[in-house]
Each structure stands twice: as structure tokens, then as C-alpha cells.
Amino acid sequence: MSAAPQSPRRALLLSVSKHYGGTDVRVEQLARGLEEAGRPYAVAVMSGSELHRRLEKDGLRVAPLTAGRGSPALARDIRRLSSGGNIVVDAHQVQSQFWMLAARGLSRHVPKLATVHSDYASEQKGRGLREHVYPRVPKFATMMGADCVAVSESVRESLRATGIPNRRIHLIPNGISDPGPAEPYHFADWPDDAFVVLGVGRLEHVKGFDLLIDAVAMVSDELPRLRVAIAGDGRARAELEERIVGRGLSDRIRLLGFRDDMPRVLAASDVFCMPSRTEGLPYALLEAGMAGLRVVATRVGGLERLLNHRATAYLTDPESAESVAEGLRWAATEEAGRVAAAFADYVRTDFSVETMVARTTSLYDGTPSPPGG
């Protein structure tokens, strides 16, 4: 990034995601931080998306994109929104980064950032062309003058592995604020003393919810109070529903769909389980930690770097339903309660949303602060 201008750069945050997730949580937090600081900004989003709805509801500055994600007109609209000078474009997730680059007028003269939330190579493994194209998008972005922001050390390492110089990668971990107490969600037809395990994420193969379902089948007799709620939506929903029925777990596992009341769902849960096949630094994990939930998570990517086995969470082996089952057994112990308290303290101390916003805005102005996290 070039030297800092005399006045704050206008920030155009770009997110063309169709479904609301952890990426959009960060976009929303940045928009709120920019608004509170009185800085010029806008968030370019797909018209009618969940992120669009949330930003408008909160009175934040939103620029709806009406062209479809497959239309060349999308590049034209992004180019129009980035006109006027003294602007920086911050593109979140790979589709946004692609369209940022497709807007030809942004090729050199507009400062650009590609904020990378996951290890694209691991996340897209086995998904045909995506496996080869997605990891190359941030590298191509740097060739077109962009810098990269990595949300975790594991993401930074994945960017280095593509050949991006370390000086072009800025580590700014996700941050979170304490939402305060919430009225617990009521899980109808479940016993009042149910021991609730919560999973949160897109219903996709990479999130590993199939492993969680198989693990519940293994421990259902040992843990009769165990119930599982999975919040999120995606292409694997029908497959997961079929798996739940096939394992005879329809009374034990519930797919909640997309939720806009996650503080209430967290308040009604005891354990957070993230059996992912790859992860960066998921907001859902930080939210669960701050809520005091016991955490069972796979020993992969950003999870392995963030968590310490049986000190802040129970780490399971990748691709192992048996290991997830062991984690669920552990979660029912007194030790798990003490570990959850330690993790909650860690999240509150080390993952401040204020720090994340401050370091990002410094980067927008071309004066990156020392790396943290």
C-alpha cells in the first residue's frame, strides 16, 4: 500500500456472497467501526442478500449491486462505485476478489485489499476447477497491485504457499464484541435438562457435520440427554437430513436453518462442536467461546493454532467420527467446564473487535500497524 493520504481514504467494502456467514460478520463489523469513527465508506453487496438486509436495518451505508454474479455488468457497477479518487477497495471472499479484478479501472491506480478468510486450497479440495482456480485468485490480485489480509496464521501460511511475498500479507485476526446476556432459545419437544451440542456453519461437506451425526449415533446410549442443533443452510441439507433419518436420530438432531438470533441459540446450548475439514478463524467459534460453551473442534488449520487440547478445547482428529464421539464424551465432564471458562477468558482478552477495526483502518490509509494475533 502507498503512503498515507492527508485525509482518510474512502473505503469500499465488497462482498458478493449469497449466504450470510462469518465473512459477512467481519464486513458488518468493519462497516459499524467505520460508521462510529465518522469515516467515509460504503458496503457493496448483492441486492436483497441477508447482509444487505442487516446493513440497512442498522442504518449503515450500503450500495446494492443489482447485476447477477455471472453478469459482466457487475464489474461495471463496482468500477462506478470506486470512482472519485482517494478510495481503497477491500474485497472479502474469492468471488468478490474476482469481480474486483474484473473491474478493469481498478487494475493499478486504486489501492486494493483481498481479505482472505480461509485456506482456499484445502476448502475447495476435490471440487474440480475451483480447487485450482480459487487459491490463485489472491496471488493474481497481488500481481494487479493488491495486498492481502489474512484472518489467521494458517490462512497467512496458505497465502505464502502460493508464492505471495510476506510483505504483501497482513495478519489481522477476526475480532468479536460481547453481545451481553440473551434470553435462551426454546427447543420445542426437547427435555428441559437436555445437554445441547451446537454446530454452526454452511451445510457443506467441508464443515464435517456428517461426522458429527455419525458421532452422535455412537454415543446416544451413553449420553441419553444429548441433543444436537445445527444452525446454517447450504447444498448438503438434504444429504444431512437423510443421514439423520438413516441413523435413527430424528429426535436427537435438529437442523435449524439460517438463524438471526444466534445469541439466544448460544445461550440455550452447552457445547459447541466444529468438526470441520478445514477452517481459518471462524467467528462462530469465537462467539461460542465468549458465550462460555465447551468446545470440541477438529485439529485443522486455524483451529489447531488457536486451541490447545484440553486447555481451551477438545481437539479431534480430522475425518474421524470416532474422535468426535470421544470429544462429546469429554464435553460432559467437569474438566470440560473448567476448560470452557479458560477459553472464554482467552477470547475476551485476545480477540477484540476494536483492535481488528483499528488495524484494518490503518491499513486502509496505508499505515499498517504492527502485526498481531
Image (tube, helix red, strand yellow):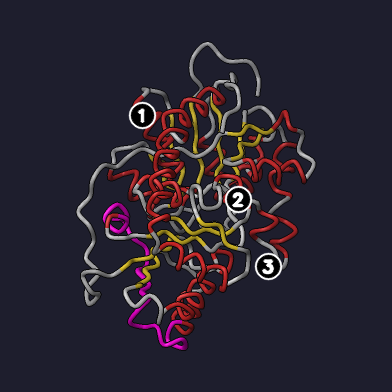
Residue type, label 3: Arg
Residue 161, x across and y down, in percent: 77, 45
User: Residue 128 magenta-drawn?
Assistant: no
Q: Which residue, given by chain and number where applicable, does mark 1 sit on? A: 35
Residue type, label 2: Glu
Q: CA distance from mark 3 to mark 2?
A: 24 Å
Using the image, determine if residue 190 lies above or below residue 335.
below
Q: Which residue, given by chain and number where applicable, does mark 3 sit on? A: 127
Residue lying furthest right? 163
Q: Quadrant of residue 276?
A: bottom right
For image coordinates 68% across by 58% down, the residue present is 122
Mark 3 or mark 1: which comes first in sequence? 1
Q: Which residue, given by chain and number where applicable, does mark 2 sit on? A: 304
Q: Quadrant of residue 255?
A: bottom left
Mark 1 or mark 2: which comes first in sequence? 1
Label 1: few (<14), some or many (≥20) within 10 Å?
Answer: some
In the rendered structure, which segment of residues is drawn in magenta? 244-266
Of labels 3 and 2, the one closer to you: 2
User: Residue 257 magenta-drawn?
Assistant: yes
Residue 75, x across and y down, in percent: 58, 46
